[in-house]
Amino acid sequence: MDKDKMLRLMRFWMFGTFLIIFVAATLFAGAVIGTGLLILREPFYWLAMGIAAAACVATFFGYKWYLDRKA
């Protein structure tokens, strides 16, 4: 498999992972706290989502670095 195809596949999986984290955290937190989608008004919720997004981006660029180094 060539490097470009592997990077596209990793980008797809990282985006999907972030979407699953976002939806699961929103629904779970809204159900447990009992506020529904009002959880979206909380700044610490957005901080957690920012950290999750940064982790996904860092994973992608780490993988890209790994592929560049491997070749």
Image (cartoon, rainbow, N blue to C red):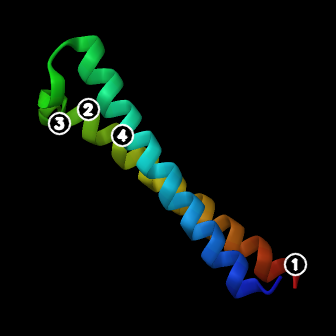
How far apart marks 3 and 4 lie (CA) works out to: 11 Å
Q: Where is residue 3 shown, x and y percent of the image?
A: 76, 84
Res. 47 image quadrant: top left
In the image, which is nearer the foreground, mark 1 or mark 3?
Answer: 3
- Tag 3 and tag 4, C-beta contact below 8 Å: no
Question: In percent of the image, x 35 and y 43: which residue is there?
Answer: 49
Image spot of residue 36 (x, y percent): 17, 24
Q: Measured from the top left, where is residue 24 in percent x and y?
A: 40, 33
Tag shown at residue 44: 2
Element under disc 1: helix
Q: In the image, what residue occupies the spot 53% across and 55% down?
A: 56
Tell whether 32 sits left or right of 66. left
**N-terminal label among 1 and 4:** 4
Say which of marks 2 and 3 sits in front: 3
Work out which quarter of the rendered image holds the N terminus and state it: bottom right
Per the image, label 4 sits on a secondary structure element best described as helix
When the figure is inspected, residue 12 is found, relative to residue 40, above or below; the finding is below
Residue hosting label 4? 23
The disc, 3 or 4, on the residue closer to the chain's N-terminal end is: 4
Q: Nearer the viewer, residue 68 or 18?
A: 18
Task: Determine which residue is flagged by label 3.
Answer: 40
The residue most toward the right is: 70
Q: CA distance from mark 2 to mark 3?
A: 9 Å
Tag 3 or tag 1, which sits nearer the N-term? 3
List the residue tagged with mark 1.
70
Q: Amino acid type of disc 3?
A: Leu
The location of residue 54, given as percent across then percent down, is: 46, 55
